[in-house]
Image (cartoon, grey):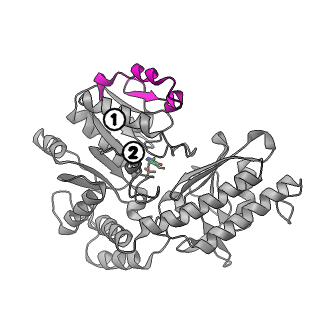
Amino acid sequence: MMNHVLKCHDIVKTDFVRGENCSLYDSRGKRFVDLESGIWCTVLGHSHPRLNRVMQQQIEKLVHLGTRYPNNLVEEAAIAVLDIVGIEPGKCVFLSSGSEAVEFAVQIARRVIEKPLLLTFSNSYLAAYGSAGRKSNNEWCLFDWAMVANHEHMDEMSSIPFEKISAFVFEPGGSGSGFVKFPPKQIVQRIALRIKQAGGLIIANEVTTGMGRTGKWFGFQHYDIQPDIVALGKGLGNGYPVSAVAMRLEIAEKLEDCGFRYAQSHQNDPLGSSIAKEVIATMREENWIERGNRVGTSLLQGLKRLEEKYAVVKEVRGRGVLLGIELRSNEHLSVEGLYHALLEEGFLVGYYPAGNVLRLDPSLTIEEEDVLRFLDCLNLILENKEKNRPLLENGI
Ligand SMILES: Cc1ncc(COP(=O)(O)O)c(C=O)c1O
């Protein structure tokens, strides 16, 4: 299987054929609970009936259009996006992936604010390629917030050449590296203020933290700052590849006036826009931000109990449905071992050996019952580890 598909990652032998909310089923009918939402995308679960319906209807009508031709659906989706990001008046463009959205936001900042550098936190993941992917030091200034996190060395911030920076690209989850370490509010606010004072822009990279993942619509809302540009992806399409860049009207007009042109084949596609619009409507009408936050809080509390109970658990942290479990490295339980034990029991989670972190990004729609089953299973595995038994009865 998969002999003709380029291997870009370690492949785990599974053959999922169907998804329904947080359940994935393999060809033998075995059910797995997806606590990763694909790769952090399906905020409303797999195969959401309402989204499937809209997708099917739109496929019958119009999937794709040339970049010159306006479409009312795209306009409606843009209004919905601008409304949730709190940018009014503003403009929006739809692309396909998160990397495209962040890279495009960076290009916009470069064009609008003619300063040579961009600023981001050193552990922030921004994109798979482009300037935002490379983060080369002739274009980017990387700042390690952990250096000033205890507030004793705030003056370290003076090493940031604020006057040379066109934009601070803020990724509110510290999440790309998988570590789930949230940058402190005071530091973010200070940087945002200094950037603004020096005439730069704030770009929020909400590809992962957006669409309710952190318990609010957007991760930047935990920081009481208002970005000038917001890049969205992943959850916006609930698994369908649609992303967006929303910006203040003044920025959009500057771009339009200076003759800036940007065209790619999949830009403002009616299909993607119709899905984004329906994801937003569903989240609003069915109150998923609040409901997801409630289930995330109960998962966090359950994990905190395991942190208190087992020495191997160093720290549990999270916001909404973005959670990390850091293991103590000297306790001879690898996150990879734990991942495989959970997989065997039918739970899909993320693991990041570099940070010794197991990561959970379930859908906002995960059922409480699955959360409890997961906590029971993790408890049993950790108990077996503590008693020096195999992690599972089958010898794993
Ligand atoms: C914080 C963040 N930014 C950007 C991206 C890039 O998005 P995509 O993989 O859709 O290109 C990711 C992907 O994981 C991400 O986590």
| Relative height, residue 40 to residue 261 (above, below) | below
Position in image of residue 150 (x %, y %): 54, 30
Looking at the rendered image, the quarter that the N terminus falls into is bottom right
Q: Give the residue number, with chain letter if any, for mark 1.
A: 192
* Residue type of the residue flagged with mark 2: Tyr
Q: Is residue 355 above or below residue 287?
A: above
**Toward which corner of the image does residue 61 lie, by quadrant?**
bottom left
Residue occupying the far left of the picture: 257
Q: Is residue 54 visible?
A: yes
Label 2: how many residues lie within 10 Å, few (<14), some (14-19) or many (20+)? Answer: some
Judge whether residue 190 is colored magenta: no
Residue extending furthest right? 388
Range of magenta residues = 137-165
Q: Are marks 1 and 2 in contact (CB under 8 Å)?
A: yes
Which residue is located at x 37 percent, y 32 percent?
190
Amino acid type, residue under disc 1 in the picture: Ala
Q: Is mark 1 within 8 Å of ligand 1?
A: no
Closer to the camera, 135 or 215?
215
What residue is disc 2 on?
223
Q: Position of residue 3 (x, y in %)?
A: 62, 58
